[in-house]
Structure formats: C-alpha cells, structure tokens
Image: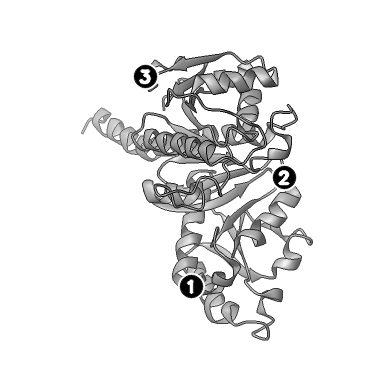
Amino acid sequence: MNHQEENIKLGISIGDMNGIGSEVILKTFEDNRMLELCTPVIFANSKPFSFIKKILGNNAVIHGIDKLDQAVKGKINVLNLWKETVNVNFGTNDSTIGKYAIKSFTEATAALKEGLIDILVTAPINKYNIQDEDFKHPGHTDYLNQELEGDAMMLMISDQLRIGLLTDHIPIKDVSKEITADLIIRKVKTLNKSLKEDFNILKPRIALLGLNPHSGDNGVIGHEEIKIMSPTIKKLFAEGILVTGPFSADSFFGSNQYENFDAVLACYHDQGLTPFKTLSFGSGVNYTAGLNKIRTSPDHGTAYEIAGKGLADPTSFREAVYLAIDVYNNRKNNAELINEPLVSRQKEFTSKKY
C-alpha cells in the first residue's frame, strides 16, 4: 500500500455568520499544526470572514481565493462565493444571513459530490432562517441524503459512545408511524456497514432502543416492540448482524449498558441526543453515516448568546475535523486492503515456474 502522506482537501461551509461558527473555525485553524493534516477551504467570502476575525482578535492568517484550484496547502483558504457586502450582526436571527449559510452549504456539497474536495465539515446553521423557496429541508442531513448516494443516518460520535437515529427531524406524533420493519432493517444495515468501513470494527455490536416506556412492558404500554422490533431484530441477527434489543431507554444509559456495544440505535431524535449531549456535550461530533461522501459537524448550534464574544469552545468543531480525516483514511485504507490481496496473488502466480 502507498503510505505517502496525502494532502486532504477539507471543505467547510460557513454556517450562520451571526453565530459562533466562524469563531470555532478560526480557533481550530489558528493552530498551524491543523494545517499539516489537511488543506481547509471555507466556502464564504474573505471580507466578512476578515471582519469577524478582527472583532474576535484572532491571529489566524486567511488566504482569499476565487477558484478551488487556487487553494494553497498550509493556508486557511476562503473561497469567495459572493461579491456583495454582507452585514454581520452577532447574535441576530437574520434571514439574509441564512441565505448565505445555505449558499455556502449547497456549493460545498456540490464540490464534495464532484470530488473537488475530499471531506466536508459544516458549521452550525439556524434551521428557521434557512427556509425559502429554494431550500425546504429541516437541516443538513436531509439535503445531503438527496444529493449524495446512499442512505443518510445521523450518527453522533464521542469517545464514550456512538448513537444513531431511526428517525431524526420529525414531530414526535409521527415517530410511531415511521417505525417499520423495513426502516429498522435499512438503518441497522447502514449502521453496521459504517461501523465496519468507517470505524474499522470487524464485528459491530449494535443495541436497539425500544420506542415505548419500559420498552412496551410486554405490550402493556405499546405493541411496536413485540410486533415490529423484536421479530426484525431476530431476522437481522440470523443474517449475522449482531443487533440486540429492544432495550428500555430510561435505564439503558444510567446503568452503563451502552458500554457493552459499539453503537446504539435510538428511535427518535431526543431519545438519542439527550443522553448523548448529557455525556458528551461540547466534544461530540455529528457524522452523516451511510453516504458515499464524508460529512461531519460539531454537536452544538449557533449559540447566538455568546456569538462575537470570543467565548466559543472549538473542541467539537476540531473533533469534527479529526473524525472526517480519520474516516477518509479508514475508507481509503480499506479500499486498498480489498484490492491488495488480489494483486499479491497475481504477482505470486506470475513468479512461479511450472
């Protein structure tokens, strides 16, 4: 295998410029050692980004470019997507800023799709001010699922645990209608594949949480566990996928059961993210598993209340960069391992004398 160091091109969507996104980006790459790991390209405009840098008193040196092929290794490249003046007002919910956040994200996604960047890290957006006639998605994940190949799954990652979601940004009243055998099979297989290919886990152990309190109490509080979840788990297990459950969600984390598994699959957003953020807030990463391209994001939002004050913690964003690079390298190495044995056998065959 070729172990020569690769210049990984990291695309970054700017997110809501009135929030803390720009600050955590600047703080992350202010450390020049980060520039040895990848070449960042921020999809935005150098003028407002320079303004934000000045307000924050950040020492990072940015390099404005007009085309992706102008990106320079060892520099913080900012791709100028627009020319007009943009007014940044920290802590303000502004639909105009929302439009630029989505322009940055959709352009970065297009570059990822075309292979012009290798990985994508998205800074936080405000899901309210991004909605317009051209963008009607509840968040990043749904748009990525539309644009990229695969079956997108929100997978929250930290040193302590990995939590995936069967359903994500839908109302609670609709969750039970969405929980079907087909959905469980699809998501478990997506998670299992990602754990193998993206995280190098040979035989992943997956826990599925129940939908109802006490996992339905044998049908007393609901029938989804008995009628849908348990039979589907047995079917998947028989196929060689090490998934077990459904587990009662209220005691699963408090009793540290999650430590026995490589990943947990929750039925809905808050069932998974409440324990995740309790255990890992500020250092976790949102990874979009199941796609042919790599995208990560910090586990926090725009944090308007501290925007522009220099108080934002860059840990989660930095971890999102690390994870994106790790997954990229894992996928690359796994692809090389798949091809290498065949090549080796061919060389061995041609070298023998018969």
Residue occupying the point 51% across, 49% down? 139
The earlier-in-sequence mark between 1 and 3 is 3
Numbered disc 1: secondary structure: loop
Residue, disc 3 = 69
Report helix, strand or loop for mark 2: loop
Q: Amino acid at mark 1?
A: Thr
Could you say which disc has been placed on residue 168 in the image? none
The residue closer to the viewer here, 168 or 106, is: 106
SS state under label 3: helix
* Residue 30 visible in the shown view: no
Count neighbours of disc 2 (C-alpha within 10 A) and say few if under 14, some if 14 to 19, many if 20 or more.
Answer: some
Provide the residue designation for mark 1. 180
CA–CA distance in space, label 2 to label 1: 30 Å
Residue 228 position in % (x across, y down): 52, 77
Residue at 57 percent of width and 78 percent of height: 224
User: What is the three-letter code of the residue carrying label 2?
Assistant: Phe
* Dot 1 crowding, Cα within 10 Å, few <14, some 14–19, many 20+: some
Quarter holding residue 113: top left
Q: Nearer the viewer, mark 1 or mark 3?
A: 3
**If you read the primary sequence from the N terminus, does the residue marked by circle 2 or circle 1 appear first?**
1
Q: Position of residue 135 (x, y in %)?
A: 43, 48
**Is 351 or 236 nearer to us in this picture?**
236
Tag 3: amino acid: Asp
Q: Which mark is on residue 281?
A: 2
